[in-house]
Image (cartoon, grey):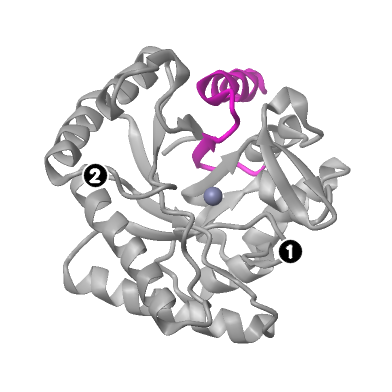
Amino acid sequence: MPGILFGSSGIPHSAEGGDTVKGIQTMRELGLDAMELSFTHGVHLGPASARDVRRTSEETGIKLSIHGPYYINLFAKEPEKVEASKQRIWKSLEVGEIAGCDYVCFHPAYYMKAEPKTVHAQVRDILAELQGKLHDQKMRIRLAPETTGRVTQFGSLAETLELAYELKELLPVFDFCHLHARENGKFKRKEDVERVFDEVEATTPWLLKDFRMQVSGVSYTVKGERAHTALADSDFPWKWLMECLKEFGVNGVAICESPQLEFDAMKMRDYYKGLP
Ligand SMILES: [Zn+2]
């Protein structure tokens, strides 16, 4: 995949009132190349619709992915909550496989005041187990733990890279506005953005060939993310990110999660394409 493909999360505003199929067709009309299906409040696609979605994505060439449910905590205190979290991820994977999606991303866990290392070990073991199940069933969809936006959430850049190094089949999603918010405005200079790519290159260089990311504006406090915002309403330096993607020769997909959805996705695409 040469360079970066752009898309947005959920049904685009330009297809309001339409279903997922209409959303995918609209992305194509807008000259965008990807769409993320939002299962954040539950898996809402049945097998028959999933097949329609797959057909439409094959016809249009739009790359699909899924954002899994928010109610996931692989380090919950109660074993039944951990089990339910695994089930939610698995259900998304099953539907996503039918729909021809590349990955299911999710916010893996909360620290629950435990040692980060302990949380890491449990998350890794569960993802390894799910990965094994994908293998057994010959499914090609991938697990995509996301970099998270709050200090109470497992999923720093270092933790995410370590997971991806340990379980090489993961396709982590680098949510840049989460990285920014988690450290109370991490990206103050362009070098701060460059450092992310240096770190990926040093630990998991293969990810730069199929780099998956989420981008939007963000508001935050010392505790991290408060809300996703339009690019124009945030100090998140999205232009530096676009420049780094070019400069580091990254190939991949950027999903826009701002309230402006496809409009901000096109803004990023146009800026990226205009770069030398
Ligand atoms: Zn997310």
Percent coordinates x, y for residue 100 in the rendering: 24, 44
Q: Left or right? Give the position of 110 relative to 87.
A: right
Percent coordinates x, y for residue 245 in the rendering: 63, 39
**Number of numbered labels in the structure image:** 2
Kindly check if marks 2 and 1 are in contact, taking CB atoms under 8 A apart as contact. no
Q: Secondary structure at mark 1?
A: loop
Q: Secondary structure at mark 2?
A: loop
Q: Label 1 is placed on what type of residue?
A: Val
Q: Which residue is mark 2?
A: 100
In the rendered image, which quarter is residue 162 located in? bottom right
114 is higher (above) or lower (below) than 165? below
User: Which residue occupies the extreme right position in the image?
Assistant: 188
Q: Left or right? Give the position of 153 relative to 46.
A: right
User: Which residue occupies the extreme left position in the image?
Assistant: 48
- Range drawn in magenta: 248-276
State whether label 2 is within 8 Å of ligand 1.
Answer: no
Mark before the other along the chain sequence, 2 or 1: 2
Say few, some or many: other residues with alpha carbon within 10 Å of mark 1 (under 14 / 14 to 19 / 20 or more): some
Q: Label 2 is placed on what type of residue?
A: Gly
Q: Residue at x 23, y 51 (%)?
A: 95
Q: Which mark is residue 205?
A: none
Q: Which residue is mark 1?
A: 151
